Each structure stands twice: as C-alpha cells, then as structure tokens.
C-alpha cells in the first residue's frame, strides 16, 4: 500500500508517480479559497474527469437491483480474511491485474480489521464489505484498473463526506489514488469521522478565505466550457506576442523613436508602444518637433500612417465587402467574421491579428449594454478600417518590424477606440496626439500610457512637410490666448470666426422685414452660437398684393431692400425646366446609397466650386445633403428628383456662389429677392435654389403682386411665411424698378437678367 505524502506545492498533484520525490499519494481536504485554489480545482477537476472519478453529492447506496445482481454473481458469503477477499475480488472485478487485486484486497482487509478492533460485529463487517464491493463496481471500476500506473488516478469529492465514503476513498487512496475533498462548509463534519486528522491533510495557503457564495463544480464546469469555447476561438497560439510599454521610459516621442533592436531581446515578443500625449510642452516648438519626429521615423524606413481629426468612416463599398451573417452567440459571430482577414498571407502575422481581434471583441462584448447586433456593427467598422490601413502598416511584415500609427486629435467615439486598441496589440506603435486640451479623446485602456502637458494648442493636422508647418512666436500665441478670451462666449465675434451654421426661419410681421433686412444677424431674435455652430435667424417670406394699390411705392419698397449682398430675380422662371445642365450627367456618381459622395464630387474634374474655401464647400455640401434628406422638394426619392437637386445646386450662378463665399455667419447675411408679376409658375430648379439658399442662411422674399399660387407647386411643405399687404394688381413690369430713383450701391449688377 502507498504512503500518504505531503505536497510542497499544488503542482505536486500533477506529477507522475515515477517523478515524485518518493513513491506516495496525496489525500487533502480543501476548506478555504483563493485564486490559486480556484485554478487548482479547475485543473484537478479536468484531470479527475479524464482519469478518475468526480463525486458531486453523496455516493448512492446500493439499491435492490445492485444487491440482487451482486448476490447472483457472488452469493452472500463473507469471511474475515484477506485471501477470501482477494479471491472474491478477482471474480467481481476481473479486469484488475494481480498487483491491483492484492493492493485493494489488503487495503479492504486492513480497514475491516480496524472496524473489528473498534467493536464492529461480523454482520456489520459483511455489510460494509458488500457496500464497498458494489461501490467499486458501479462507481469506481474505471480507476481500479489503473491503479499502480505511472499516471496517478484522481478522486475529487464535493461536499460533506460520510463515514463509509471516507472509508472507501481511503481504501482507494492507499491503493494508489490521489484524493481531494472540497468542503465548502469547513471541517466540522469531516472531523466527526477522523477526529485526529489521521487519514488526510488540510490544505493551507496564504491569503485563503471562505469559499464565495455559489461556488461549486457545476459553476466551474460552465467556466471550463466557456474557456474551451474561447480556446477554440483563438486557435493556434501566435509565435510572438506583444510586449507593450513594458520597456517604455515615459519620454513620449523619444520612446517612439527608439530603435526596435534596443527595445528588448526576448525572442518571444515584439516590442511596441501605446501612448497618448495630451497638450503640448512648448507651443512655439511643438509643430517643428513633430516634423522632425516624422522625418526620423521615415528615415529609419519604418512604415507610418497618419490620421488627422478623425478616422474617416467606412464607405458603403467597404462595408459591403465584409462578409457577415446573423449570429446567436458571441463565439459564432467572432469565428465567422474572422474569415474576413483571409488576405493576410503570412501565417504568423495572421495568428497575431486573429488573437488581437478575439481579445478586443471579447472585452467589448463584456461591456454594459452590449448586444450581438451592436458588437457586429463595431466589428464591421474594425474590419473595414484594418483592411484600409493594412497595406501601409503590415503588408509583407517581417519580425521584428514595428510600423507606426499616429492619430492627431484623439478618438471621437467607441468605434475609433476599439480600432486603436486592436492596433495596439499588433506590431504597431500607436501614438495619439491631443494638443488641444479643449478636445477630449474618449479612449480608455489599461495598457495606454498617458503623458500630460498644461499648454494647449488648437491644431488639427500633423505636419508632414515643411510647407505645412506654421510656427507661432511666443507673442503670437499670447495674442491667440487673448483673442480666445475676447471672442469666446462674449457676444463679440472675430471675422469669419465660425464655419458651421444652421438656419432658423423667423416668423415676423411684414413691417419687420424692412427693419431686420439690413441688420447683422447677431442682433436678430433667437441668434445664438452653440458648440461652435451659429444659429442664424433668417427671413423667408412671400409678399402678396400691392399696399394701397400704389405701384410706385410698391417698387420703391422693393428697391430699398436691394443691398450690395442682394441677388434679384425679376422674371419667372429663373431657370427654365429641363434647361441643359452639364452636371446632370454625373449626378448618379455624386449621390449613391442615399448619401452625397463628397470626396467623389470634390475630386471630379467638372466640380465647379473647388476654388472656394474648404469650410465653405463643406457648408454647401452639408446643406445639399440636408435638402435631400428632408425631402423639401416634391419627387425626392420618387422620380429621381434627388439627382436633379444635386445637379442644380452644383451649377448655381457664380454671383450667388460668391455671396456664399463671403458670408460671415455672425454678420449681415446675403439676400434673394424674387419678383413674379405674371402667371408663370417657378420651375423645380427655382424651387431647389430657393430651398437650398434658405438652408445656407440667405434672407429670401418673393414679391407676388398678383397673389397667385406661382411658387408653391414644387415644395412638399411651405418654407415661407405669407404676408397679404394690399390689393392684387396684374401685368406689372418688374423692369419698373429701373425707373424708381433712389441712391443705390451698384444694384443693377445684382439683378439677374435671364429671360428678359
């Protein structure tokens, strides 16, 4: 029989018999818990499940069928001697070899002898003997045949063990099994059977506490199953893993410039860094330092990708290229989406990317409020961006190369954060620069190293070339700070301070049009600036009739409204329906999948507004998208009107475009006066121009002395306020404006004369 030995550490349980310091077995009970215990139980459970027996709850007593079968095979004879037990054992468990038979028989005889010495009669001994025989046959037969082998069988018992159960596992332990008792309620029940703790040892480790509520083997099985699912997700372990920031000195750009060979020499790792630098150390030298840093990275033949302000969202064609389906589990989702990285030919790099993808998605999936649909959308964005930047970062990668990804401005949302976390697990240095302290980078990650400076510098682009560098003097930056204090939230505005605006149509009396018309918009009711977006109160009105029937005063009142920034249309329609438009042939390229293709438009050789300031172009294209989205014009998304809208707005009169270019959102806004004295109905193209200019921020007034419904036909809803000012008069000549004498500022140049 085997001696019971004491372990030096938990791993001793998993040492084969031939490699143990001296032949022996381990019998321990575990009454308390820590992380090491949890990991041990999971490992021991796995071993017992494969090469031993796991008991959850009591071992069932032999039932009538068990006893009947035993009696049929063995009879009910019993003799208190070892030879009898050995002979009967050979018949009952014929798979045992002689060594196993001898060991088990000797162990049973010794136990029965001890019971006899304690006063148990022969009938009690016989009952115990039959119970042990049945238990060994029905519960432990699988390990009895392995006794004495180099791999030691395991027994794991969960719960408060009974006297006969303790006797049996002691028999098996003596014969060559390791035994572990999990006692969540402590030692009280056990010590009733073994008061001096002679049969087993109590496991004692530093930091042990009471078992957590609900801890049990069933819970561990679920965790093991999850762990196995995750293991299947990861597949083959990559040859190299990331060592991120462990070698880092915390010097920011200097760490990024460190040669790869000097970062570390453990062949199991590639050494990358993951860092965010908030603010700037010196405003005067910051941009030049970045430029010199960029040159050093390039001169070291390291690949580099730079993104300014935000990572452009995936285009529809990028999203459509990602193969995906409907999923019931996170594991199913990840395994299927992983097929989209099949363009990586290097198997080691593919393993690295595979592991990083699983890591970030499993972490993201554990977040509060996350569901499969949200996770799928995030994963699709991640795959789109990785495919976009893969060639410049990792194509033809060779160990130990480390490329560089620089994000100027910081992550704006969770999708960007997820992608940056993903890159940080690859052979890529990730540097986030957030020089403007008024902006917040939303990225949070335990591996991210953060460097903070107190100075703030509002720049949006990383200087890649000398020509891009604008280095301000100390005086310049001091002036900028004073400028910021003066113009931020004070009601005073710098020229062209803002580049985003939203129109708000005012409801006014007719008499107020003349009062508000030539007034700076910042003095109008409901003007405001919110989050750097100007809310512009604008006039959009239709004036019907002639006040008091006085035609001369009527035209005089119109002429008073013709300012330097007023565009006048005197004949309807301004643009004849189906007039040749050179942009119509390209409209289907410019608008796809319900979205204006801004870059396609800007890069097109026929694009007519490329000479405008970038922010003006963006303002115009944004309002064009809104005009379509809001379906202000009849036929939008029904008969191709959206393409007519695109072509018409991109082919406006140069004079109107110039007025938009010079429009300062906090000062006087440009105007459009449309005089329609006849029965002619304005064209769809006229309606498009009017609705667009209203969104851009123009004041617009229709003068319709006839009162006819000549302007409403192509609008889905009224965008103008109607004023009735007098009697209707017909067949007036709009050219009568020329005969009205008043001091004007070259107003004739503002009157569009098409159709005269």
Image (spheres, grey):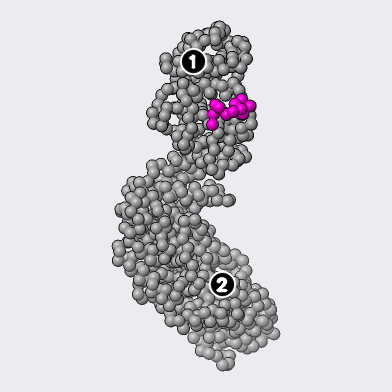
**At numbered mark 2, what does the secondary structure look like: helix, strand or loop?**
strand
> Residue 560 in the image: x percent, y percent?
60, 87
Q: Residue at x 50, y 9 (%)?
A: 84
Residue 301 percent location from the top left of the image: 30, 62
Q: Quick one: 517 or 228, which is closer to the camera?
A: 228
Asked whether residue 198 is drawn in magenta, I would say yes
In the displayed structure, 368 sits above or below 544; it is: above
Tag 2–tag 1 contact (CB < 8 Å): no
Which range of residues does the magenta coloring cover? 190-201
In the rendered image, the vertical position of residue 551 relative to residue 716, given as above or below: below
Mark 1 residue element: helix
Residue 1 relative to residue 367: left or right: left
Residue 613 showing in the rendered view: no
Residue that badge 1 annotates? 105
Q: Which mark is residue 533?
A: 2
Q: How much space separates mark 2 and mark 1, taking CA atoms?
A: 91 Å
Between disc 2 and disc 1, the foreground one is 1
């Amino acid at each position: 029989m085997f001696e019971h030995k004491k372990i030096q550490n938990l791993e001793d349980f998993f040492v084969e018999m031939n490699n143990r310091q001296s032949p022996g077995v381990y019998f321990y009970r575990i009454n308390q818990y820590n992380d090491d215990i949890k990991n041990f139980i999971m490992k021991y459970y796995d071993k017992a499940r494969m090469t031993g027996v796991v008991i959850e709850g009591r071992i069932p007593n032999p039932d009538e069928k068990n006893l009947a079968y035993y009696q049929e095979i063995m009879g009910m004879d019993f003799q208190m001697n070892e030879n009898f037990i050995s002979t009967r054992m050979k018949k009952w468990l014929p798979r045992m070899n002689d060594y196993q038979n001898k060991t088990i028989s000797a162990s049973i005889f010794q136990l029965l002898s001890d019971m006899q010495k304690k006063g148990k009669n022969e009938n009690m001994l016989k009952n115990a003997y039959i119970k042990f025989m049945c238990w060994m046959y029905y519960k432990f037969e699988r390990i009895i045949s392995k006794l004495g082998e180099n791999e030691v069988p395991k027994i794991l018992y969960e719960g408060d063990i009974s006297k006969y159960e303790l006797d049996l596992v002691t028999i098996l332990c003596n014969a060559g099994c390791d035994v572990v008792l999990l006692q969540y309620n402590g030692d009280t029940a056990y010590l009733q059977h073994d008061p001096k703790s002679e049969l087993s040892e109590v496991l004692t480790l530093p930091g042990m506490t009471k078992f957590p509520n609900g801890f049990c083997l069933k819970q561990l099985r679920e965790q093991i199953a999850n762990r196995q699912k995750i293991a299947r997700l990861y597949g083959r372990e990559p040859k190299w893993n990331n060592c991120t920031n462990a070698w880092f000195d915390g010097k920011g750009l200097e760490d990024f410039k460190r040669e790869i060979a000097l970062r570390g020499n453990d062949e199991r790792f590639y050494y990358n860094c993951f860092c965010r630098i908030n603010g700037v150390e010196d405003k005067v030298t910051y941009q030049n330092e970045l430029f010199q840093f960029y040159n050093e990275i390039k001169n070291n033949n390291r690949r580099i990708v730079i993104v300014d302000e935000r990572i452009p969202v995936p285009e529809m064609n990028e999203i459509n290229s990602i193969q995906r389906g409907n999923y019931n589990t996170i594991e199913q989702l990840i395994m299927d989406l992983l097929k989209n990285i099949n363009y990586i030919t290097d198997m080691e790099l593919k393993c690295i990317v595979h592991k990083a993808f699983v890591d970030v998605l499993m972490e993201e999936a554990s977040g509060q409020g996350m569901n499969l649909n949200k996770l799928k959308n995030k994963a699709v964005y991640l795959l789109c961006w990785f495919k976009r930047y893969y060639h410049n970062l990792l194509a033809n990668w060779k160990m130990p190369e480390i490329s560089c990804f620089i994000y100027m401005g910081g992550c704006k949302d969770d999708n960007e954060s997820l992608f940056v976390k993903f890159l940080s697990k690859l052979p890529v240095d990730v540097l986030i620069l957030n020089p403007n302290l008024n902006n917040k980078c939303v990225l949070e990650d335990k591996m991210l190293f953060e460097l903070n400076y107190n100075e703030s510098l509002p720049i949006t682009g990383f200087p890649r070339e000398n020509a891009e560098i604008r280095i301000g003097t100390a005086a310049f930056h001091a002036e900028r700070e004073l400028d910021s204090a003066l113009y931020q939230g004070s009601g005073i505005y710098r020229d062209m301070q803002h580049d985003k605006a939203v129109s708000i149509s005012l409801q006014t009396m007719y008499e107020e049009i003349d009062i508000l018309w030539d007034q700076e918009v910042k003095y109008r009711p409901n003007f405001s600036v919110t989050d750097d977006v100007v809310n512009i109160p604008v006039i959009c009105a239709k004036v019907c009739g002639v006040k008091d029937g006085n035609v001369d005063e009527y035209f005089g009142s119109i002429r008073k409204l013709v300012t330097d920034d007023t565009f006048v249309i005197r004949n309807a329609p301004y643009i004849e329906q189906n007039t040749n438009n050179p942009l119509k042939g390209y409209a289907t390229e410019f608008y796809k999948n319900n979205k204006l293709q801004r870059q396609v438009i800007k890069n097109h050789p026929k694009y007519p507004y490329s000479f405008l300031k970038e922010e003006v172009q963006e303002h115009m294209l944004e309002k064009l998208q809104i005009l379509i989205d809001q379906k202000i014009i009849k036929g939008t998304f029904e008969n191709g009107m959206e393409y007519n809208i695109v072509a018409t707005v991109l082919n406006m009169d140069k004079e109107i475009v110039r007025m938009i270019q010079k429009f300062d959102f906090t000062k006087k806004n440009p105007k459009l006066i449309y005089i329609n004295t006849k029965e002619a109905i304005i064209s769809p193209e006229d309606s498009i121009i009017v609705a667009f200019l209203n969104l851009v921020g123009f004041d617009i007034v229709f003068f319709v002395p006839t009162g006819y419904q000549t302007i409403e036909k192509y609008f889905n809803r009224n965008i103008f306020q109607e004023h009735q000012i007098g009697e209707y008069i017909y067949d007036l000549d709009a050219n009568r404006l020329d005969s009205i004498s008043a001091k004007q500022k070259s107003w004739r140049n503002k009157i569009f004369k098409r159709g005269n």
